[in-house]
C-alpha cells in the first residue's frame, strides 16, 4: 500500500564552494558542520525575534556542496540573493520535479524500475543518486508524511513519463491526503502552525533550531488533540487571525482533519504549558471544536518508529499495533 504525490511546491537550490555552509548559516541557525555527505538535516528558519518562519531540509552532497529545499519560495530566493564570491548558488526549482512515494508498499512499487537493493539500504534522512527507468534521479528517505517512503528528485523533462509509470503502481493523491498524514504524524504544516508567532521551543522543535534558548520561550506548547466537530473536516485551517492562548484550558487550533486512524477529528494547536502540566480541560474560543482531549504526538506512532523501520520489519510491526 502506498500513494504517489507531486511535491511541485518545494523549491530547491544548489550551493557549491567553500562559503556554502556560511551561506546556509544565514538562513538557519542549526549547526550543520557535522553533517556527512549523503545525509539530510531538517532545520528551521527564524526571524530576528526568534519566531519560526519555515522549515527546510539541507542535503549535503560533498565537502563544499549542499542543497536546500523549502516549501517557502522566499527561502530559496533569499539564498540566491546572498550569493558570495566563495559560493555559487543556483535555483534549481524550475528545472526540477519532485515526486514522493509514501507508504509501506513504496519499495515494492519501485521493483523493476530501479535498483531495489540500493533503495532498501537508504537510511532515514539519507539520500543517494539512483536511476529510475533510465532517468538519473536523487532519492531521499525523509518520510514527509510520517510514513515509510521515498522522495524522488528528477529533471523536469522526464517528469511526465516517470509520473505515468509510477501512477500505474501507486495511487496518485493530493495535498489534502499528505497534510492529513502529517497531522496524524504530529508534523507541523508551516503554513498553519507558524502562522502564530512561535519560537522553535514553543513548536516543540527546539532540537532543529539554533543553540539560543530562553526560559520565556516555553510559555506555550504545540499539542495533538482529538475533538468533536459538527461536520467532518477534510482539512481544516484557520480563516481568522490567530491569537496566542491566554488562559488555562484555551487552545489555539492551527490544523485539523477527519482522521480515519483516529476515528474522528484530529488536530494540532497551542496551549499554555502551565495548563498542560495541570491537565486543565481544553476549550476552543472559536467554537469549532468541542470535547477536546489531548492525544499522543504523533497520534499513530508515539515511539516515532514508523518511517525509520527497515522495510522487512515494517509489516510485522504494523500488525503488532506499534
Image: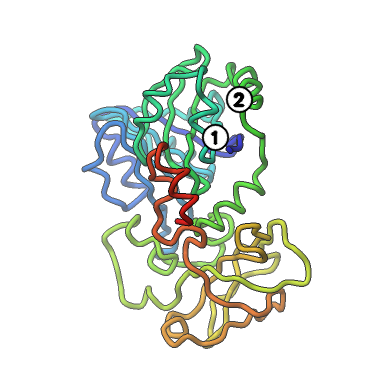
For label 1, count other residues whose C-alpha is less than 10 Å away and answer few (under 14), some (14-19) or many (20+): many
Nearest to the observer: residue 86 or residue 260: 260
Choose top left, top right, bottom left or bottom right for residue 274: bottom left
Nearest to the observer: residue 164 or residue 207: 164
For the question of whether residue 77 can be seen, the reply is yes
Mark 1 in CB contact with mark 2 (< 8 angstroms): yes
Disc number for residue 166: 2
Residue under numbered circle 1: 101
Extreme-top residue of the structure: 134
Q: Secondary structure at mark 2?
A: helix
For the question of whether residue 85 can be seen, the reply is no
Q: Which residue corresponds to the image point at 36% horizontal and 32% vertical from the top-left? A: 122
Question: Dividing the image into 4 quarters, which one contains the C terminus?
Answer: bottom left
Residue 20 higher or lower than 112, as above or below: below
Residue 97 higher or lower than 134, as above or below: below
Q: Which residue corresponds to the image point at 25% horizontal and 40% vertical from the top-left? A: 35
Extreme-right residue of the structure: 231
Percent of width and height locating residue 223: 50, 70
Percent of width and height locating residue 58: 37, 40
The type of colouring in the image is: rainbow
Amino acid at each position: 500500500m502506498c500513494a504517489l504525490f507531486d511535491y511541485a511546491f518545494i523549491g530547491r537550490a544548489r550551493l557549491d564552494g567553500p562559503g556554502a555552509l556560511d551561506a546556509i548559516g544565514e538562513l538557519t541557525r542549526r549547526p550543520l558542520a557535522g553533517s556527512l555527505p549523503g545525509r539530510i538535516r531538517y532545520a528551521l528558519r527564524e526571524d530576528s525575534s526568534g519566531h519560526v518562519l519555515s522549515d527546510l531540509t539541507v542535503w549535503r552532497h560533498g565537502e563544499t556542496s549542499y542543497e536546500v529545499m523549502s516549501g517557502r519560495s522566499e527561502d530559496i530566493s533569499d539564498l540566491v540573493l546572498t550569493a558570495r564570491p566563495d559560493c555559487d548558488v543556483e535555483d534549481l526549482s524550475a528545472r526540477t520535479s519532485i515526486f514522493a512515494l509514501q507508504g509501506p508498499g513504496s519499495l515494492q512499487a519501485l521493483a523493476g524500475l530501479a535498483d531495489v537493493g540500493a533503495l532498501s539500504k537508504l537510511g532515514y534522512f539519507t539520500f543517494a543518486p539512483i536511476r529510475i527507468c533510465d532517468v538519473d534521479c536523487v532519492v531521499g528517505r525523509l518520510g514527509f508524511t510520517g510514513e515509510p517512503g521515498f522522495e524522488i528528485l528528477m529533471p523536469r523533462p522526464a517528469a511526465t513519463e516517470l509520473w505515468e509509470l509510477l501512477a500505474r503502481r501507486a495511487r496518485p493523491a493530493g495535498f489534502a491526503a499528505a497534510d492529513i498524514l502529517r497531522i496524524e504524524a504530529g508534523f507541523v504544516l508551516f503554513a498553519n502552525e507558524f502562522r502564530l508567532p512561535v519560537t522553535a521551543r514553543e513548536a516543540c522543535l527546539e532540537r532543529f533550531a539554533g543553540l539560543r534558548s530562553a526560559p520565556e520561550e516555553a510559555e506555550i506548547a504545540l499539542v495533538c488533540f482529538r475533538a468533536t466537530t459538527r461536520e467532518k473536516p477534510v482539512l481544516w485551517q484557520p480563516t481568522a487571525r490567530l491569537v496566542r492562548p491566554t488562559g488555562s484550558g484555551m487552545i489555539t487550533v492551527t490544523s485539523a482533519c477527519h482522521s480515519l486512524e483516529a476515528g474522528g477529528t484530529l488536530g494540532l494547536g497551542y496551549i499554555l504549558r502551565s495548563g498542560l502540566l495541570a491537565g486543565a480541560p481544553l476549550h476552543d474560543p472559536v467554537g469549532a471544536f468541542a470535547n477536546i482531549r489531548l492525544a499522543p504526538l504523533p497520534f499513530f506512532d508515539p515511539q516515532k518508529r514508523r518511517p525509520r523501520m527497515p522495510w522487512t520489519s515494517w509489516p510485522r510491526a504494523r500488525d503488532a499495533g506499534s
